[in-house]
C-alpha cells in the first residue's frame, strides 16, 4: 500500500481535491469551519506530495549525494 501511495500520491490528492466541491453540494449544511480545515489539510498534503515528487526527480537526475541529503532533510 505504501508503494502505491508513493507512486500515485499526487493522483490520489487530485481525486480528494476534486471530491471537495461535490461533497459541498451534496451536504450544504456542512459548517464552513470544517471545509476550511479540509482545505488546509489538502494544501498541506499538496506540499508533501510536491516535496516527494521533487525528491524522486532529483534521484532520477542523479543529483550529487550532498544535495540529496539536504532534500531528504527537508522532507522529514
Image (cartoon, helix red, strand yellow):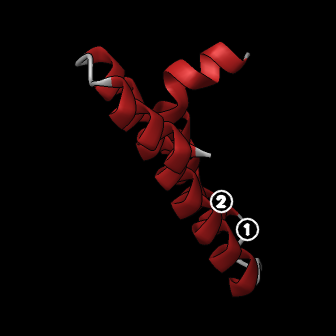
Residue at the (22%, 19%) spot, across then down: 61
Distance of mark 2 from mark 1, alpha carbons? 6 Å
Residue 19 visible, this orientation: yes
Q: Does 24 sit left or right of 60 as displayed?
A: right
On the image, the x and y values in percent for residue 51 come to: 44, 44
For residue 42, the mark is none
Q: Quadrant of residue 71?
A: top left
Q: Mark 2 points at which residue?
A: 23
Report if residue 18 is visible in the image. Answer: no
Residue 42, picture quadrant: bottom right
| Residue 18, image x, y percentages | 49, 50
Mark 1 Cα shell of 10 Å, populated few (<14), some (14-19), many (≥20): few
Q: Residue at x 70, y 20 (%)?
A: 2
Picture residue at 51% right of the left edge, 24% below the top: 8
Give x and y (percent) for residue 14. Answer: 47, 43
For the N terminus, give its image quadrant: top right
| 60 left or right of 21 in image | left
Farthest bottom residue in view? 32
Q: Is residue 33 above or below residue 22?
A: below
Q: In this view, does 34 lie above or below 55?
A: below
Rendered image: mark on residue 27:
1
Looking at the picture, tell me which residue is in the foreground, 45 or 37. 45
Q: Tell me if label 2 and label 1 are in contact, CB under 8 Å.
A: yes
Q: Name the element at disc 1.
A: loop
Q: In this view, does 40 lie to the left or right of 59?
A: right
Neighbours of disc 2 within 10 Å: few (<14), some (14-19), many (20+): few
Query: SS at mark 2?
Result: helix
The outermost residue toward the front is 66
Amino acid at each position: 500500500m505504501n508503494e502505491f501511495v508513493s507512486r500515485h500520491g499526487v493522483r490520489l490528492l487530485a481525486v480528494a481535491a476534486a471530491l471537495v466541491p461535490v461533497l459541498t453540494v451534496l451536504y450544504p449544511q456542512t459548517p464552513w469551519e470544517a471545509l476550511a480545515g479540509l482545505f488546509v489539510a489538502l494544501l498541506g498534503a499538496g506540499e508533501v506530495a510536491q516535496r516527494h515528487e521533487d525528491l524522486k526527480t532529483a534521484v532520477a537526475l542523479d543529483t550529487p549525494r550532498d544535495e540529496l541529503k539536504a532534500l531528504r532533510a527537508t522532507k522529514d
